[in-house]
Amino acid sequence: MAINVTLDHVTLELSIKPGKADEFIGMAAEAFKVTRTKKGFIDIIATQSTDDPNKLVFWETWETAEDYNTYFNWRVETGFMDAIAPFMTAPSVKTLLKPVA
């Protein structure tokens, strides 16, 4: 029986201002509580570089890219992205990934 994998994965790479990583991680953990209730959400993992504690990568899994984009646009519209901007040293880098093998 073949399995049709249609899940979409997203990475969000974040560069946080020195000394602000712990505060940002706490804020993100609270935000994830709402993220987990959104349509199409499957999983989210926040990771921190072992070489640079100010480098974070969120690895997210969504049923579809459309579900993720709806969620992300909601975050923008509610001002969350503006709220996290003061923590950042550079714009976040978002990558949408699809399974290929």
Image (cartoon, rainbow, N blue to C red):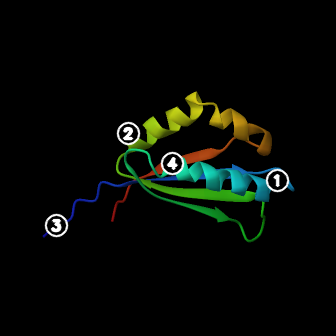
Lower position in the chain sequence, tag 1 or tag 3: 3
Read off the residue under disc 3.
2
Measured in 3D between alpha carbons, the distance from the residue under mark 1 to the one under mark 3, in whole angstroms, is 46 Å
**Residue behind mark 1:** 20
Q: Could you tell me which residue is drawn at 77 percent across and 64 percent down?
A: 53
User: Where does residue 47 sit, x and y in percent of width and height?
Assistant: 63, 64
Residue 89: x %, y % from top left = 79, 44
Q: Residue at x 70, y 57 (%)?
A: 25
What amino acid is labelled 4 in the image? Thr
Assign a secondary structure to mark 3. Answer: loop
Q: Amino acid at mark 2?
A: Glu
Q: Left or right: 44 with respect to 42?
A: right
Q: Which mark is residue 35?
A: 4
Is mark 2 in CB contact (under 8 Å) with mark 4? Answer: no
Percent across and percent down for residue 35 are 51, 48
The residue drawn where x is 78% and y is 54% is 23
Q: Nearer the viewer, mark 2 or mark 3?
A: 2
Residue at label 2?
66
Q: Quadrant of the N terminus?
A: bottom left
The mark that comes first in sequence, 1 or 2, is 1
Question: Real-space Cα distance between discs 4 and 1?
Answer: 22 Å
Residue 85 in the figure: left or right of residue 75: right
Kind of residue at badge 3: Ala
Q: Earlier in the sequence, mark 4 or mark 3?
A: 3
Residue 87 percent coordinates (x, y): 78, 45
Q: Residue at x 58, y 32 (%)?
A: 76
The reply to whether discs 2 and 3 touch (Cβ–Cβ < 8 Å) is no
Q: Residues within 10 Å of mark 4 (few under 14, many from 20)?
A: some
Labels 2 and 4: the sequence-earlier one: 4
Mark in front: 4 vs 3: 4
